Amino acid sequence: MTDIQKTISPIDGTVYLERPLASEKEIQTALQKASAMQCEWRNTPISERARLLSRFVDIMVSRKEIIAEELSWQMGRPIIHGPNELRGFEERSRYMISIAGDALGRVDAGKKEGFIRFITREPLGIIFVIAPWNYPFLTSVNAIVPALMAGNAVLLKHSAQTPLVAEHYTSAGLEAGLPEGLLQHLHLGHDQVDRIIADPVVSYVAFTGSVEGGRSVHRAAANRFIGMGLELGGKDSAYVRYDARLGHAVETLVDGSFYNAGQSCCGIKRIYAHKDIYDGFIEAFEAETYRYNRLGNPLDEKTTLGPVVRTSAADNIRRQIVKAVAAGATPLIDEGRFPAAAPQTPYLAPQVMVNVNHSMSIMMEETFGPLVCIMPVGSDEEAVAMINDSRFGLTASIFTQDENAALTTGKLANTGTWFMNRCDYLDPALAWVGIKDSGCGCTLSRVGYEYLTRPKSFHLRTQL
């Protein structure tokens, strides 16, 4: 009997769609097709890969209105925000396509009498992409488009919450003219994921998800010498320095905390405000939180804060708040001003916690929802110490008018990305990387191509 995967919509708790999980025969067929097609695709000129993938991007972007509504039903994002994900998808795709020729070009080792020496970037083979639901296009595109541009084949497994995203990838690829078998998706259970990771034809695993999910991927690959890119959790922080432009900092950080209902690996969860501006910052942040967030049905164009992905996720956040209050923290936001919020549903009011410290789990554990904590600090040094006092290390940001202060503190921050006067954004020209429990590997930028290829050296003696 075939196992069925069900997608429960956070909008109303109904089954939005069902998909059968792949059979073992379907998995074997997909791997065989990918392996055969990759042998041909690797010999396709980069210019032709770029032409086909540019067409693929055009097709995906043309579906943005349909995709926006589907995302609302699948994971609860407000429909007015849905097209933003396709804009980011397009930006990253077109940038990675544009730099591929240079990034994948031959590296000249320099002149040496009697020799020709150079290094090429060779595709790895089959890239297995395991993508999450929270930003289902933005997380997956970081690996899929550059993997294909580099001459690899891609097998995609998307979250059970967003299976239609995987289906869009495959159908748009075929419509664009990508060879059949080059970009495929499979709906899979956990054991099937492990089985594919262990298959000798798979060359690399690109996983985005939880820390425990990353550990599971690592265990499944433990007996194989293959590469892995693991983009995992975060407890990302911001430091509002005494010289910050307060209005800009407040608006930026409220958006960074509550956009996508706070369900972002690089969303802001900890804010350290300098004591000299702390009271004014708190007052303005509270007011902006009420103004920014309109909780309700994500299909309503007036809604800016939808439900979190499922009731169990909302309940976990509610427990974190209760535990923090018992430890002495103070919630600033009156949930009564958000009538759509209700217990035993995924509709959760935004919350801002103060009177917090690092002895509280709410400052140390990952929070995947519309919750942010704010505490005062007395100096740049204290802010950096607080930022680094975490098992996560994805991004952090500083809000200041002093570029030198931003550079000095940034060098000390143990994160993969350091922002000044912005947050929660991926620039495709820069390497996207986490440290500590936020993962390993790299996507985007020229550096990202190095993880999807292997170097091959040519050492030719021309004089005997």
Image (cartoon, rainbow, N blue to C red):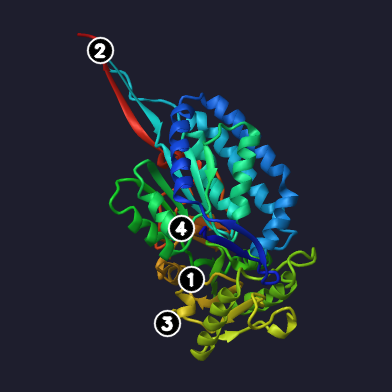
Q: Which residue is more in the foreground, 177 or 218?
A: 177
Q: Residue at x 41, y 37 (%)?
A: 125
Element assignment for label 4: helix
Q: CA distance from mark 1 to mark 4?
A: 22 Å
Q: How many marks?
A: 4
- Asked if the residues shown at circle 3 and circle 4 are in contact, with their CB atoms under 8 angstroms apart, the answer is no
Residue drawn 55% across and 57% down? 420
The answer to the question of whether label 4 and label 2 lie on touching residues, with beta carbons closer than 8 A, is: no
Residue that carries the numbered disc 1 in the rendered image: 366
Q: Is residue 399 visible?
A: no
Mark 3, residue position: 359
Element type at marker 3? loop
Nearest to N terminus: mark 3 or mark 4:
3
Q: Earlier in the sequence, mark 3 or mark 1?
A: 3
Where does the image place residue 113, in percent across and percent down from the top left?
26, 14
Residue placed furthest toward the top: 464
Gap in Å between the C-alphas at discs 1 and 2?
A: 58 Å
Q: Residues within 10 Å of mark 1 (few under 14, many from 20)?
A: some
Q: Which tag, 4 or 2, sits closer to the chain's start?
A: 2
Tell me the amino acid under the disc marked 1: Glu
Give the mark toward the camera: 1 or 2.
1
- Quick check: 130 above or below 201? below
Q: CA distance from mark 3 to mark 4?
A: 25 Å
**Disc assigned to residue 410:** 4
Q: Tell me if residue 45 comes above or below residue 330 in the rendering.
A: above
Q: Nearer the viewer, mark 3 or mark 1?
A: 1
Instruction: Report, in whole angstroms, how far the alpha carbon at label 4 lies from the one at label 2.
Output: 47 Å
Q: Amino acid at mark 3?
A: Ser
- The reply to whether the C-beta atoms of the residues labelled 3 and 2 are less than 8 Å apart is no
Which dot marks residue 114? 2
What is the C-alpha distance between the residues marked 3 and 1?
15 Å
Q: Quadrant of the C terminus?
A: top left
